[in-house]
Image (tube, rainbow, N blue to C red):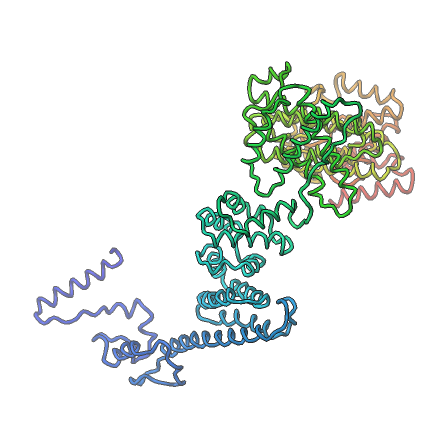
Amino acid sequence: DEILLNAYASRKKHREQQQQRGNPQPYFDMDIFSVSRFPATLPEPLRPKPNGIHANQLRIYEDFLRVPRLAPQAPAGQMLHSGYNTGLISLLEQQQVSAHQILERFAQYISDLEKLISVTNVPSFGHLPLQHDIITIIHQIPLLALSSFDKAEAARTFAQKVVQLLYKSETQLGREVYVVLLERLCEVSPNVGVLVTSWLTHADDERKYNVPVTVALIKANLINLPEQDQELATLIDSGRMSAIDFTARLIRACLYEEGGLATRQDFMASLEALSRLRGNVPESVLFLMEEMRRRSVPGSTAAPVTLQQHPMLPQGLSDEEVAIREQMHVLFSEWIRLYQHPTSTDKILKVFVTQLSQQNIFKMEDMSSLFYRTCIEASVEHAIKHKQLLNQPVGLTYLPIDALSKLIVCLVELPQPPVDNSAMGKAAMDSPDSARIALFTKILSIVILVISQMHDQRQQQFDQRPFLRFFTSLLCELHSSEQQLQTVYMSILSALSNTFNTLQPLNFPGFTFAWLQLTSHRMFMPKLLLAENQKGWPIFQQLLISLFKFLNPFLHKAKLKDTTRMLYRGTLRVLLVLLHDFPEFLCDYHYSLCDVIPSSCIQLRNLILSAFPRHMRLPDPFTPNLKVDLLPDINQSPNILSDYTITEGIPVNQGAPIQIFQYLLNELDSEGRYLFLSATANQLRYPNSHTHYFSCVILYLFAESTKEIVKEQITRVLLERLIVNRPHPWGLLITFIELIKNPRYSFWNHSFTRCATDIERLFESVSRSINQT
């Protein structure tokens, strides 16, 4: 209204003036000629005049009404009968004619395509030569849609026709040709792809119940399989027999006839709906269920996995003991059959576990322990036996172990976990969480006993892989149930940590590689280190120290064996992950970790000492005239979680500490001095008060020492940490740069910098790199 206010006022004023004159005249807005550029750009015959539209101008609008919708293209230079050029009308007619021609050309392409499909004797689209006419037409049709004024509408129209032909096609070649053409049309416009996929997935049309066509569309990703699964499940629950029969035949085709096109998980909702059918079940459903029972793994023709009918039993057992063990074996076999059944859901599994937990064997300490041991031993023996078979799928080999992991987690999840009548069991009955921890700890202790027995008996033939699979599967199952076990999850991780600590390489060398993989597992290490209030840090520190203690004697050797080198590389990778994701952990425990690393492992130690808090930005140590003592973080004390004491606030050149340092340098032999200087250099880390203090200590000792051997050893300790691969600790860099650049220390005047040609070249190289930087 505000914009039109002046126009309203002008018209009102004109009306009042005309009423006073008694001879009203129409109002003409003359401002349009000065405000708008369009009237001036129109040809003279079409330009508006103050007296309104003339008859010749009005005739143009009347001629627009008489233009036919699909009129033939006007000849060049045709005029309206008013005699004026009508470029706009000619353009409109040309576009309409083009749309008509596009539809005619598309119809011709489709006709040619149908004829070619009928006469081409080729089994599938992939066997067509590149220059075949069918491929040429498939390329031309999307280009035809792109040439249209509305390419999305043209592609949608084409796609509708192609879908009709697709469901009428009776040959493999025809289906594949139309599916490929549909894919190309969906690429013309994203909207077309969305519309086609939505119709193919959700349209309630029984013409869609065509298994070969649906399989071809699934292969081309033109059907959204999760949504299709839900759609089919709804139709099955509604009792539509045609949908039930189609779903069964489709699942059978996708799982077993098309080389594993899909998995059972892709049709989980449909399979659950089929399992709920009662009464007159179609034969196709019965065939599918029988096929799935016969094939425990998609794509496999093997029978369902079963344990040995008669388990291997120790000698000297009474008939009653044999019967009890066989009963336990049967119970576990039943669980495995249910676990691998295609229609089993978590709800069904938990019902079975609830019934199992009410058995008498769980009410007695010895009986329940025997049950868990029987399950563990049977699973491991099954894996070892099937590992020896050629071309055996991994899923079949470890299926009993995976089933056992699931059973353990399901038992722990129960509202009232089965605990025995022992003193520990009665104490655990005070709360469900206590019972869960007691049960889980008990099972882990039995696993340790089984590993210990097999490790001692089989020596070099001990196979760690089944137990690696067990713990890995257990971690995955626990991760899936983390929400249900939230109140005890940290306690469960602690119990696992204690188990891994018992199974450390020093105690079980044959379990070393599995142990390293488990302690650094993505579902164990991060969860432990991300626990609230850093509760998991001391636990993981002990595991890491156990690893370094085991490696220590091997790393002292000049030449490493292949197995030791592989273990060392694995350790380096674990430290790199910690350095990247949990640097504060390495910062806080650097004392205790460096204490157990051999002095020869310079790169390993550098990785730990290079860690710095994530919130900190390190100053560039190569900055000219860097004032370290003025840095904001240099007076902050670092967080130390190891059991060490450091005296702060005393000047470097005063007090008892520096006197002790000088005494040690003078009195210790070469090895003792090296160890002392290495321990001092371990404090040269990120900017903090400890780094600053010990950097000044090292420089002071170098300057004040009167022994050339002391200066040489200080240089050696610093230099050997810099000539290895990165990363290098920040404090180490600033200390060495200060040492060689500050004239006070006269570094280049000492004879040890030129004692040998190789040493001289090394120092020159280091000096050049520092000065260039």
- 752 or 137, which lies in front? 137
Residue 672 screen position, x and y as percent: 86, 23
Residue 444 higher or lower than 513, as above or below: above
Position of the N terminus, as image quadrant, is bottom left
Q: Where is residue 755 in the image (x, y as percent from the top left)?
A: 91, 37
Q: Which of these two is toward me, 364 or 654? A: 364
**Residue 87 falls in which quadrant of the image?**
bottom left
User: Residue 478: x, y in percent?
Assistant: 61, 32
Q: Which residue is drawn at 27% across and 58% down?
A: 3
Q: Which residue is rendered at x = 63% and y = 34% of the image? A: 335
x 61%, y 54%: residue: 261
Residue 618, visible in the rendered structure = no
Residue shown at 59%/36% (left/top)? Answer: 480
Residue nearest the viewer, comparing 11 with 608: 608
In the image, residue 91 sits, relative to residue 199, either above or below, namely below
* Residue 79, position as x, y percentages in the image: 34, 85
Does residue 680 lie above or below 131 as drawn? above
